[in-house]
Amino acid sequence: MRLSSPAIHAIGATCLAGVLGVGYFIGIHSRIIARAEDSALQARLDSMEHVARTSEDREAVLRAQIDRVELAISSGRTLRPLSALNGALAQIAEIASETELVIDGLGPGVSMTPAEDQIVTTPITLSGRGTLTAALRTLDQVHQTMAGVEVGSMSLSADAFGDQVGSVSIEFLWHADRAD
């Protein structure tokens, strides 16, 4: 049986397509899958590195806070008991009023206590209106009169600079003794 020229070409093209298909699945397809797996592993590694950096940053912040509290304790300034939180809020409110900050809100956040530690840290957020000078005087008075209080963050609206009144937000970190 003799095949015609178009039949021979069709058989050749079919064989060539089969060889290319096998080559694709052996060579190119496996590389595509390996590259996808590498990308997934890289994304997982990046995520784990981010978590590790975040944990290290948080640990550094907590260590710095503990160092500052220990320094305050060693300098003779004692921490108030945790039950004195309302008194600390009242004292901050009084200082803010004396330094001409108008209080819109003042309240505690969720207390944080490292395991087996006697020191409890409670964020206290003060929001209000005033000038930059009033905000800085508030910070100075709190620092001078209240043991175990530090500034966690502070933000001012653009209008609060100079003698202009703008919005002020201060987060204090109040460190207290767990034992009452």
Image (spheres, rainbow, N blue to C red):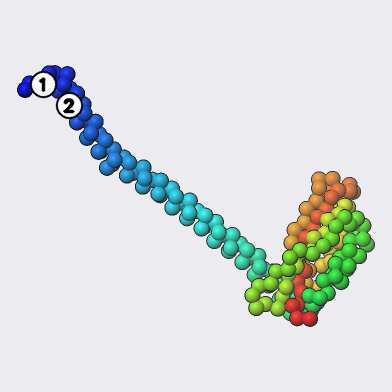
Residue under the point 77% across and 69% down: 174
Residue under the point 19% across and 23% down: 10
* Residues marked 1 and 2 touching at CB (< 8 Å): yes
Kindly state the secondary structure of the residue where label 1 is placed.
Answer: loop
State the CA–CA distance, disc 1 to disc 2. Answer: 10 Å
Q: Residue furthest front?
A: 1
Which class describes the residues within 10 Å of circle 2: few (<14), some (14-19), or many (20+)? few
Q: Nearer the viewer, residue 82 or 141?
A: 82
Residue 46 versus residue 159 in the image, above or below: below
Residue 50 versus residue 61 in the image, above or below: above
Q: Amino acid at mark 2?
A: Ile
In which quadrant is the C terminus drawn?
Answer: bottom right
In which quadrant is the N terminus drawn?
Answer: top left
**Horizontal relation, residue 155 to residue 59: left or right:** right
**Horizontal relation, residue 50 to residue 133: left or right:** left
Q: Position of residue 8 (x, y in %)?
A: 14, 23
Q: How many labels were placed on the picture? A: 2
Look at mark 1 in the image and give the residue it sits on.
3
Q: Position of residue 141 (x, y in %)?
A: 86, 65
Q: Residue furthest left?
A: 1
Q: Position of residue 126 (x, y in %)?
A: 83, 59
- To which quarter of the image does residue 145 belong? bottom right
Look at mark 2 in the image and give the residue it sits on.
11
Q: For residue 162, say whether it is visible.
A: no
Q: For residue 28, say whether it is visible.
A: yes
Residue under the point 89% across and 47% down: 164
- To which quarter of the image does residue 127 belong? bottom right
- To which quarter of the image does residue 16 belong? top left
Residue under the point 27% across and 42% down: 26
Residue 139 versus residue 36 in the image, above or below: below
